[in-house]
Amino acid sequence: MAGTVLTNKGLALITKLVAAQATLSFSRVAVGTGTIPSGYNPQEMAGLSAYKMDAVIESYGVSDSQTDVAYLVAQVSSIGVSSGFAITEAGVFATDPDDGEILYAYLDLTTDPQYIYADTDAISKFAEITFNVLIGSVERVTAIVSPGALVKKKDFELLKDKVDGLENPEFDDSGSVTGIASFPDFLSKVVSTMPIFQFYRDLKAGLQFVLHAGQLVNNCTSTATDLPLAAAQGKVLMDLYTQLNIVKIK
């Protein structure tokens, strides 16, 4: 059987939620090792034939091309699996305000089973199942996305490219920032949530008002009129001034 089948309880839930303008909440996804009983309509399924384990919901949303269809991406891996098994069925569960959790949609995988190895085996397995389920005119859809979902290779590569782009970041290094005319001005702009690039930009502007050793005059030959006198040189001059006063008194 191809595709995800909406169960009768799922269809009834859509009707109920549309009338109440309520949110469709997907509670979990599960996988099993059973099959549809002979002569049984999958729309009448109330649960999996042979439940094995819950899957991890990696993401969900509403289709861009079909607003009456939602998608859920579920993951199953060898982590925590004590004995290998073949996934032959999967189900999407949702919360009914009256009946509690129901099997919303059923997926028959007997023609394309996915084998999951035990986590003690040398070979591990990761399976990803995408469900496309009818939601009708339901306006809002939610699902419990697990923080433990595995990152897909394409998503990892995309994130890696973004991080690599920060290896040699650029910022405004002109040293001129409106509102910073003194070092206290810079300090007043430093807050715990300021962006890092803004901090470096403001820091360069603020440091222009901070003295460093190369700006101090430590001799008596400089003709610079805009540089401060070093304390040590100031003491030398003060000692000489004191000696002159002593000579004058004598």
Image: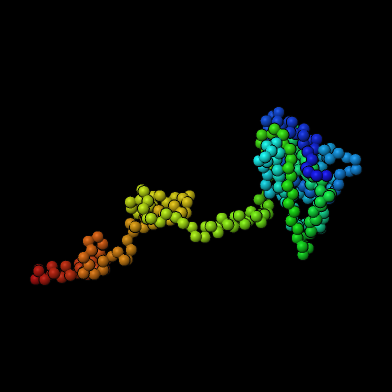
Q: In which quarter of the image is residue 48?
A: top right
* Residue 14, image x, y percentages: 73, 33
Q: Residue at point 76% right, 43% down?
A: 92
* Residue 158, image x, y percentages: 61, 55
* Residue 94, image x, y percentages: 74, 39
Which of these two is toward me, 192 or 111?
111
Horizontal side of 165 relative to 221 (left or right) equals right
Horizontal side of 7 relative to 154 (left or right) equals right
Please state, as top left, top right, bottom left or bottom right, where the C terminus lies in the image: bottom left
Q: How is the image coloured?
A: rainbow
Please state, as top left, top right, bottom left or bottom right, where the N terminus lies in the image: top right
Examine the rendering and report whether any part of residue 95 can be seen.
no
Give the answer, above or below, for where 217 lies relative to 44.
below
Q: Residue at point 67% right, 54% down?
A: 152
Q: Quadrant of residue 245?
A: bottom left
Which of these two is toward me, 247 or 25?
25
State how many labels appear: 0
Examine the rendering and report whether any part of residue 117 can be seen.
yes
Horizontal side of 90 relative to 72 (left or right) equals right
Which of these two is toward me, 135 or 94?
135
Horizontal side of 141 relative to 221 (left or right) equals right
* Residue 112, image x, y percentages: 81, 51
Q: Residue at point 80% right, 38% down?
A: 7
Q: Which residue lies furthest to the right in this view?
A: 38
Q: Residue at point 67% right, 47% down?
A: 59
